[in-house]
Image (tube, rainbow, N blue to C red):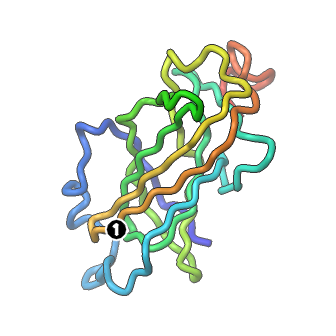
Amino acid sequence: MGRVRGTWVVGAGALSLAALGGASGCGAGEDPCGAVEPAAVEVGTGVTAFEAVGDDGIEVGKAIRGYHLWVALRLRGFAPKAVAQIGAYDIDTGESLTYEEQRSVLQLEAGADGVAEIAGLRAVLTGDALPDLAGRKIRVSATVEDSCPATATGEVLTFISDVPPEGGWPGEGGAGP
């Protein structure tokens, strides 16, 4: 598996694929778009490593500035720099539970198997989404694109397993898991 070299979260107004142009992260003379397999995105969870979402659902984290879902991605077929847009939606109503304009710039390093994994991405929940989150059935979706252009979307259907109490989980000083 590959590893992440870095991520940045920015507002949509400050980011476009043109901003990635020329900054591929490759060495001189390397073509980030050459001989790349079809793009694919697998959505999971995890703070420090990719974990498939299982039967126990996904947990809400609490940070100083609000609540979020921990999201991790397993990617194939992308250049070393890509942009991810992540969202969560109520399955029953279609309501967006996250801020739509949140995008993350990813610097990826694929392993020998061509897979790059990134963990610790936050899908920040809107204030309107907070009441009665536990048990809610959701769809977590991620669209990733690079300047080659490669684009793919992945999603996982799950439910919110637990929501931290006000102030965070005990012993964590208000931070989520």
> Identity of the amino acid at label 1?
Ala
Image spot of residue 73 (x, y percent): 56, 56
Label 1 sits on residue: 150
Quadrant of res 58:
top right
Indicate whether 29 appears above or below 87.
below
Indicate whether 16 appears above or below 126.
below
Say whether residue 37 is left or right of residue 20: right
Quarter of the image that includes the N terminus:
bottom right
Say whether residue 5 is left or right of residue 16: right
Say whether residue 96 is left or right of residue 137: left
Quadrant of res 135:
top right
Say whether residue 93 is left or right of residue 23: right
Residue at disc 1, secondary structure:
loop
Quadrant of res 172:
top right
For the point 48% across and 61% down, which residue is it? 5
For the point 56% across and 72% down, which residue is it? 115
Image spot of residue 97 (x, y percent): 51, 28
Indicate whether 125 appears above or below 1.
above
Indicate whether 72 appears above or below 10.
below
For the point 80% across and 46% down, which residue is it? 55
> In terms of depth relative to the viewer, which is nearer, 25 or 129?
129
Quarter of the image that includes the C terminus:
top right
